[in-house]
Amino acid sequence: MTKTNIKASNSNMSDKLYKLSDFIPEFSQFRTNEDKTRIGCPSIDNSLFVSTRKGEKYFKPVNVVCPECYSRDVVKNGTYSRKLIFLTIGEQNCIVQKYKCNKCGHVIYTDLSSIVNGNANITIPVIEHIEYLYSYFNGSLHKIRKSLKKEHNIEISHQSIENIILKSEYEIEHRNWTFSGYYLFDALWVKKNGKWKYILALFDLELNTIVAKELVDSETVENVYDFLNQSLRNQKKNCIITDLKSEYRVAIDKLQIKQQFCTFHTKQLINREIRDYIDKNNASEEEIEIIHDYKSLFFDIIDVDSINEAKKIRDKLFYINSNVPSVIRKLVSKLIIPEFKKLTNHLTDSKIAITSNKIENCFLKNFPKHIKKLFKTDKGILKRFNLKLKYWDEDNAIY
């Protein structure tokens, strides 16, 4: 009978692959990122040694120095237990080594600050992963909880996840930035306990990110002025692109900064005024034709290639007939003539944007409509906004 060697299935019987860094503390400095992930500590410092003893993680420092007298004459002084939650291997029982200094008697605890904050049990890589998931799951704490359970077998409450988000330390660091001088300005509406609040935001066109923000109770001229005045102190002030809100217009005029109206919002306003007039007055076909002819002139002022062409069209509107529909006379006298520069500044400087769609896209990606009503505190609003902006910056900002 022929003898055959049949290998046992290795799914449950395969040997674990070890490296010297798993046994010899001095080899910890040679750990690769793959090694750190394998042992569940992607953030671990090379000065910290970790091994497994009877199914429990064992931590001790590679070199021990007394922090009081700086002596190296230390001896082991027992251990203590901690339960820590790791990203790739879930909750683990951990044994942490203690030492005692023979010179001054000081008890030395193994420094775990590279993997966990203070007395917490959720390790830093788990916290960073939760922050990452939050930025892409648009604020659903329960989705983050399910993802951690399914992918990493980590079981933590949605309240713990929210606490991690609220403790996020990310802030916009623009003290050393040099702004381009070309900005977009707008406000994001959010709801706190059923009441609307506003995040005033200044977006730098060349840096391609929000460089200043402030949460306020209302969009008053004073609030907008104070925010812009503070944010642009000692910075270039070439032009600010906004929509047509009067509060923005008055505040920017007060700051004596050049302003450009968003062409999309301008055309939207013109169309809305004309549509409302036609509906309310049951305009005749002849009147509608006259209105649309003038509307084309308004749009041409915005869309032409040079400021001289825009001025020629504007000049034609100085002497419009009194028989022209009132909506046209209103738009000419309230918008086209008095705000001509704000409609055409982009024709004199190619760096001036014609729309505010970049900042609106940033708002949409960070705070979509369905999460605008979920907030209970000012701190919660700003922490969440900062955290989402962090990943916007990583993908889009140029600095």
Image (cartoon, helix red, strand yellow):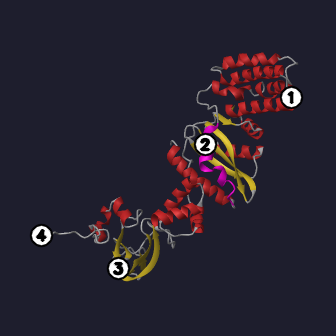
Cα distance, mark 4 to mark 3? Answer: 42 Å
Residue 331 image position (x, y, % from top left): 80, 27
Q: What residue type is labelled 1?
A: Asn
Magenta region: 356-375
Cα distance, mark 1 to mark 3? Answer: 87 Å
User: SS class of the residue under badge 1?
Assistant: loop
Residue highlighted by disc 1? 282
Residue highlighted by disc 4? 2
Residue at (83, 30) in percent of width and height: 277
User: SS class of the residue under badge 3?
Assistant: loop
Q: Tell me: residue 323, above or below residue 358.
A: above
Residue at (54, 64) in percent of width and height: 145
Say if residue 185 shows up in the picture.
yes
Residue highlighted by disc 2? 361
Residue at (65, 60) in percent of width and height: 379
Point out the frontmost of discs 4 and 3: 4
